Amino acid sequence: MLVPKKGKVSKHMSSHTGEKPFICGVCSKGFSLRQNLKSHMHVHTGEKPFICSFCSKGFYRHGDLRRHMSVHTGEKAFICSICSKGFSQQIHLKNHMRVHTGETPFVCSVCSKGFSLQENLKRHMHVHTGEKQFICDICSKGFSQQGTLKRHMSVHTGEKQFICSVCGKGFSKQNYLKSHMEVHTAPFSCNECSKRFVNEIQLERHARVHTEERPYGCDICKSRFNQKGQLQNHMRVHSGEKPFVCDVCSKGFSQHGNLKRHMSVHEGCKKRKTAKISVSDVHWFVWIGKKKKMSEERVLK
């Protein structure tokens, strides 16, 4: 019969008692094992003795190097028990599980919106602070999130990365593609023009285009319309309300179509601002912007 040594039993027991007799002389953090304290000291000395044989990146602890190796080997040892998706690190699996549980432990202190990841909460906070740290190098428009800037760049490149799997039509934004898909998937079809609709109410409203039925009448001028929204728009002619405002000259309009037509007055300015350019041109602008920033930083130093 093997009898464990007294020293080993004593070390093991600290894992149950929570005792941490080995204290860091720099930051006063405690450890249950002397070896753990020794590894921790690398944080203060900056020493990284564990080197990756593939990319030469250094690590404080051997465990960190071992986890890092999965980047090169592609090994995904941590598997989700629900969807079978694999992860290279246990912490990534833990974060992923919130997709299934719906857990949102990171809560915004301003609006109480919850997030599954801390970095998502951090990005969300820009909405409240108004900070727009992601700047377009072409038109200088600012965005609070990097993803929003990335989507904005399609305005300049003309890129349409969201492609319809049915007809191959491309869209610059995902929500445009989502709206378009209703053309193919909507269950209600017009017998006259084959246009499709999500529900019967939309189909019934559309049918008036063919029947020329106009059930909505203006009480002031007796004009009639086939849709309630058209009557509501028309009423602004009488009320003087102008909710559609030009973002160039601040002129107001009662109809969105009128604002759209008005924008041709500023067309020269607009074309210069939103001209379509190639992806390579975008990369050139980004490079120039970074070079200019570096030059300014050198001058300040």
Image: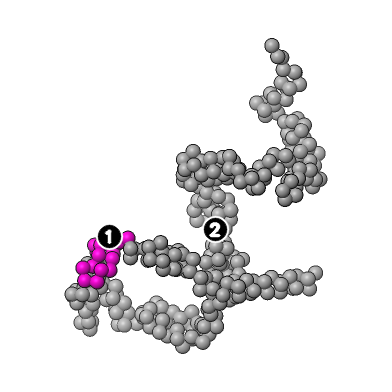
What residue would you read off at disc 1?
187
**Residue 200 highlighted magenta (yes or no):** yes
Q: Amino acid at mark 1?
A: Pro
The answer to whether 136 appears left or right of 214 in the picture is right
| 214 lies above or below 73 | below
Q: Amino acid at mark 2?
A: His
Q: Which residues are magenta?
A: 185-201
Q: Report which quarter residue 60 is drawn in.
A: top right
Q: Report which quarter residue 3 is drawn in.
A: top right
N-terminal label among 2 and 1 = 2
Query: Cα distance, mark 2 to mark 1?
Result: 37 Å
Q: Give the class, few, some or many, for how many residues have Cα within 10 Å of label 2's Cα (few <14, many ≥20).
A: some
Depth check, front residue: 256 or 275: 275
Q: Position of residue 79 (x, y in %)?
A: 53, 40
The answer to whether 292 appears left or right of 221 in the picture is right
Depth check, front residue: 58 or 22: 58
Q: Are marks 2 and 1 in contact (CB under 8 Å)?
A: no
| 23 lies above or below 163 | above
What residue would you read off at disc 2?
124
Depth check, front residue: 248 or 185: 185
Residue sitting at x 28%, y 64%:
197
Q: Secondary structure at mark 1?
A: loop
Q: Position of residue 135 (x, y in %)?
A: 60, 70
